Image: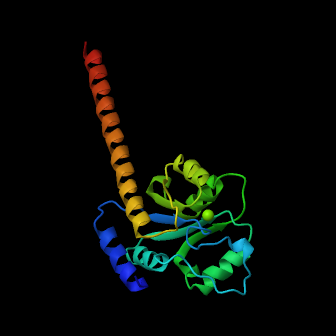
C-alpha cells in the first residue's frame, strides 16, 4: 500500500471515532523505524515502517498534534534522520534523551511544553516497561510489535475511546454520589 492509500485509510478510520486524542506521541527505534539509530551513521538514508508516513500525514490533516518520546542516547542521529525523512517539523515536541525512568520524565516535559493533559494523549512504543509506566500516568499507551501500522492505529483509537468512556462513567458516578450526599446533609440541616 502506498503512502497516499495508507493516508486515505487512516483518515477514514480516524473519522469513525467521535472522541480523539489531542496529541499522539511516538517512540522512534522499532516504532517509527526498524533499527536502533545509535547503531547507524548520520550519513545513511533511513527508511521507516511502511505505514508510518501515511499515518502521520492523516493525523496532521485531522488537526491532531504529534510528538516524539525517545530514550535514544544519540539525539543528533535521530534528528538527522527525522530531517532526512522530511517529518522533523511536524512534531510539536521532541524529547530525545536517555533516562533511567521509563519515559515518565519525557511525558512530564511534553506535558509542560504543550499543556495537553495526559488523558488526552495516545502513545505508541515497542517496549512493555515504557507502556506500563506511561499508562499509569493516564496516557493511553499501545504496545507495537512490528512498528506503527494501521492495525496499531485502530487499536490505539479504540482503547483511547474506551478509556475516555470509563473516566466519564467514573465522573458521573462520583457526581451522583456527591449530589446525594449533599442533599442528605441539607435535609439534616433542615431538621
Ligand atoms: Mg523503541
Whether residue 95 is visible: yes
Would residue 97 appear left or right of 171 to someone viewing this image? right
Which quadrant would the C terminus be assigned to in this image?
Answer: top left
Q: Residue 47: x and y, percent?
A: 58, 82
Q: Residue at x 64, y 81 (%)?
A: 81
38 versus 3 height, above or below = above
* Residue sitting at the far top: 191
Q: Quadrant of residue 91?
A: bottom right
* Front one among 137 and 1: 1
Q: Residue 39: x and y, percent?
A: 74, 73
* Front one among 14 and 51: 51
Which quadrant would the N terminus be assigned to in this image?
Answer: bottom left
Rendering colour mode: rainbow
Q: Residue 33: x and y, percent?
A: 58, 74
Q: Residue at x 52, y 75 (%)?
A: 49
* Front one among 126 and 77: 126
Q: Residue 118: x and y, percent?
A: 50, 54
Q: How many labels, in total?
A: 0
Whether residue 115 is visible: no
Q: Residue at x 69, y 86 (%)?
A: 44
Ligand 1 rendered quadrant: bottom right
Q: Quadrant of residue 42?
A: bottom right
Amino acid at each position: 500500500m502506498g503512502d497516499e492509500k495508507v493516508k486515505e485509510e487512516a483518515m477514514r478510520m480516524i473519522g469513525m471515532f467521535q472522541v480523539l486524542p489531542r496529541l499522539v506521541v511516538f517512540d522512534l527505534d522499532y516504532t517509527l523505524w526498524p533499527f536502533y539509530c545509535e547503531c547507524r551513521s548520520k550519513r545513511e538514508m533511513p527508511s521507516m515502517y511502511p505505514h508510518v508516513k501515511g499515518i502521520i500525514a492523516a493525523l496532521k490533516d485531522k488537526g491532531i498534534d504529534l510528538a516524539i518520546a525517545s530514550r535514544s542516547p544519540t539525539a543528533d542521529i535521530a534528528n538527522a534522520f527525522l530531517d532526512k525523512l522530511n517529518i522533523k517539523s511536524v512534531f510539536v515536541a521532541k524529547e530525545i534523551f536517555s533516562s533511567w525512568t521509563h519515559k515518565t520524565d519525557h511525558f512530564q516535559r511534553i506535558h509542560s511544553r504543550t499543556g495537553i493533559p495526559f488523558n488526552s494523549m495516545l502513545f505508541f512504543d515497542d517496549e512493555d516497561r515504557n507502556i506500563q509506566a506511561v499508562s499509569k500516568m493516564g496516557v493511553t499507551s499501545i504496545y507495537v510489535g512490528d512498528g506503527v501500522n494501521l492495525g496499531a492505529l485502530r487499536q490505539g483509537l479504540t482503547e483511547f475511546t474506551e478509556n475516555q468512556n470509563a473516566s466519564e462513567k467514573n465522573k458521573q458516578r462520583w457526581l451522583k454520589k456527591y449530589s446525594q450526599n449533599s442533599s442528605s446533609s441539607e435535609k439534616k440541616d433542615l431538621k
